[in-house]
Image (cartoon, grey):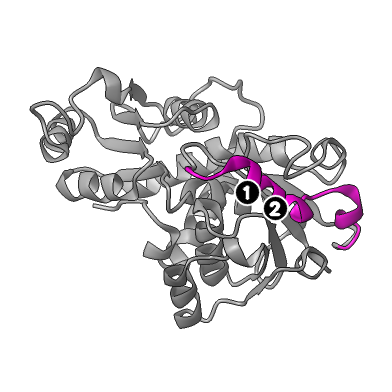
Amino acid sequence: MKNFINIADHSSGDLRAIIEEAKVRKLKRKNLNKSAMDEDKPFEGKSMAMIFEKPSTRTRMSFDIAVKQLGGSSIILNPEGIHYGKGEESLKDTAKVLTEYVDIVMLRTSSHKNLEEFGKHLGIPIINGLSDLSHPCQIMSDILTYEESNGSITGKTVSWLGDGNNNMSNSLIEAAGKFDFNLKIGCPKKYSPNKKILSWAKKNKVSLIITSKPDEAIKNSDCVMTDKWVSMNDKVNKKSKKKTLKPFQVNEKLMLKAKSDAIFMHCLPVGRGEEVTDKVIDGKQSVVWRQALNRVHAQKSIIKWCID
């Protein structure tokens, strides 16, 4: 049984195979309608349970569409409407019940511990749709998006601006190690990556530079990425955090420091006028809307890999 919880859990070979599978599947859908099934229907007769502890637009839509394009069905569960680690039923018991009902589970959670606990008691695969520590499906779709635009990401330079200690930056560091690209993180020292992920990066010889200078972080970059400064359930002084991160806003002036053909990415939702300006996110270098679409294709490949 194969789970997809963190990028670091998997070999470079398996991750590369998932990306290549996504490219092929997307290409084969070129003349199909959005809701049409893939010709081979590898998930036919199967179903996925999707549990959302946190609000969602892209994760909910992309996984639902992914399952249907693969020929299967999905069941969306709200923790408020089911026995989910509360009342008289533990996470363990809920996991055992879902094992009897469906073929795979996707969980979007505020607690990575919930993901690990749930996965431990499932007899079927589980996919991390987002946790407080990692966002692997998003990063896999970002790599797919980059390679559609600029070829192989191996050896290229990716710049991350903003909060260096969140789920996106954690998964991006892991991806830099697995896909062998250079990563530069520009963030205030207060929001540097946590020691555990930095230890992993050092052990795995990740090409990683962390700087508190935005210009240095973005210089000669092939891809510039950022994220909302204040995430959902982020228990911080929002006004203070935004003020600290203001110098790391991705604007037109800062983008000029990157390579002329550099692309801009954002996982959405976006704080327009905060972490990025309208002219950048709506500009010619932005690929954010294709990023959103590619969640479908990357996740289809992840689902297929888990059930194969």
Look at the image and say whether residue 253 sits in the magenta stretch: yes
Evaluate if marks 1 and 2 touch, with contact meaning CB atoms under 8 Å apart. yes
Residue behind mark 2? 245
- In the image, what residue occupies the spot 18% across and 25% down? 83
- In the image, what residue occupies the spot 48% across and 49% down? 135
For the image, the number of numbered tags is: 2
Q: Tell me where residue 92 sits by quadrant.
A: top left
The residues colored magenta run 235-257
Residue 296's spot in the image, x, y percent? 54, 35
- In the image, what residue occupies the spot 51% across and 31% down? 62
Residue behind mark 1? 241
Q: Left or right of 145: which side holds 286?
A: right
Label 1 neighbourhood size at 10 Å, few (<14), some (14-19), many (20+)? some
Q: Left or right of 178: which side holds 147?
A: right
Q: Nearer the viewer, residue 228 or 134?
A: 228
**68 w.r.t. 243: above or below:** above
- Provide the secondary structure element on which disc 2 rests: helix
- Provide the secondary structure element on which disc 1 rests: helix
Residue 108's spot in the image, x, y percent? 39, 37
